[in-house]
Amino acid sequence: MDRPVRIVLVGLGNLGRRFVGILAERGDAVRRRFGLDLRLVGAADSRGTAYDPRGLDARLVERTKRDGLSISGYPSAGVPDRPALDLVREAEADLLCEASPVNLRKGGEPGLSCVRAALARGLHVVTSNKGPIVLAYAELTALAQKKRVSLRFDGTVAGGLPALYLGMRDLRGAVISRIEAVPNLSTGLFLDRLAAGTSWDEALALGHAEGQLEEDPAWDLEGWDAAAKLAILANAVLGVPARLEDIARTGIGGISPSDVRKEARRGRTIRLLALADRKEEGTYALSVAPCALPRDHPLGRLGPHGMGIVYWTDLFGRIAATIEESDPLPSAATLLRDILDIYVAADGPGRASPD
């Protein structure tokens, strides 16, 4: 018998919608390979919710959002203006997928309250939303442990790259002396446009027009996004209770296009680098700042859609991983990866992606 996994999804933007598409496309393959029936029973966007304990039609949900409509219009199951938190508190479910906007400036809501409520009910949680993890890592991990459920958040750092899994799981037992990461996509694309001859104003306009930058680009360009991801790495991988205010942060606003082009002529690539550097007493200096990287550095070879991480360890030496992510699909797929990590035993059959 297939094991049912009843999923509530909060957040149906670019990432959440693509996750629903993955459920529709890969559901049968996951059932055959892993014996799991991934069943979307509830979903919420900013305009309402839909809930059916028998399961929602993932293809219809994906099509509804692709057409720009609210899930609250879902036939016989949609409820306009119902808060996502009410759905999380009341739905019969096994797992919450939380993919709402980050909103660190607004206390991480609605994501933080939804994650808290799900864990308190004894639901597993997977999230791509870095806000709750940055603001309440210790609280949420303690609550998950108390309730004996899993909290997974691999998609909060560097998109689809398993940057956290690599450090948390695969490097266990080693001392990590240094982490170098380029975890933000927008700044690399922006800097490469400057290197190609684009002006600041033109690069900003392109970033807004193509959806790579928020209306307020400061979150990316001033290094807040990279700092949030470094805080998650520090907490989850290094065991350092870091907050955003603990990270020395310099954005790319002080860089002129001529500086970027000059470094490019020298064979160096400027990237916004997140750095954790271990000190003799075992603490870590945490910083985010632009850095000119030589092309033979793993992160110096990143293209405009590239992100990456380098771990320096005593037992495993230097390990680097990179990803090219030209659309949100790999980030959305981290939700599936986290679900399988919860439900498929490490020694079980077939750890690779189903095909």
Image (tube, helix red, strand yellow):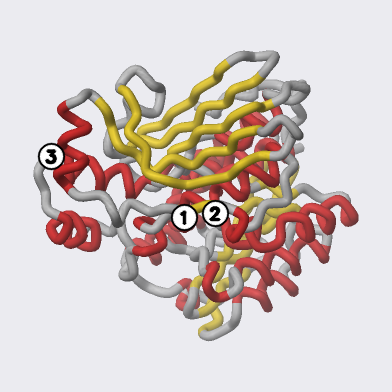
Marks 1 and 3 sit apart, C-alpha to C-alpha, by 24 Å
Q: Amino acid at mark 2?
A: Ala
* Residue in front for this viewpoint, 180 or 320: 180
Q: Which mark is residue 225?
A: 1
For the point 51% across and 84% down, which residue is it?
80
Marks 2 and 1 sit apart, C-alpha to C-alpha, by 5 Å
For the point 60% across and 80% down, which residue is it?
83
- The answer to whether 76 is drawn above or below residue 211 in the figure is below
Quadrant of residue 211 within the rendered picture:
bottom left
- The answer to whether 7 is drawn above or below residue 83 in the figure is above
For the point 11% across and 48% down, which residue is it?
198
Mark positioned earlier in the residue sequence (1 or 3): 3
Answer with left or right where residue 134 lies relative to residue 261. right
* Residue in front for this viewpoint, 339 or 302: 302
Q: Is residue 152 visible?
A: yes
Question: Which element type, helix, strand or loop, lies under badge 3?
Answer: loop
Q: Position of residue 10 (x, y in %)?
A: 57, 65
Q: Position of residue 344 (x, y in %)?
A: 72, 33
Q: Which mark is residue 186?
A: none
Figure quadrant of the N terminus: top right
Q: Position of residue 15 (x, y in %)?
A: 45, 54
Quadrant of residue 271 within the rendered picture:
top left
Tags 2 and 1 touching, CB below 8 Å:
yes
Name the residue beneath numbered marker 2: 228
Q: Is residue 110 visible?
A: no
Name the residue beneath numbered marker 3: 196
Q: Amino acid at mark 1?
A: Asp
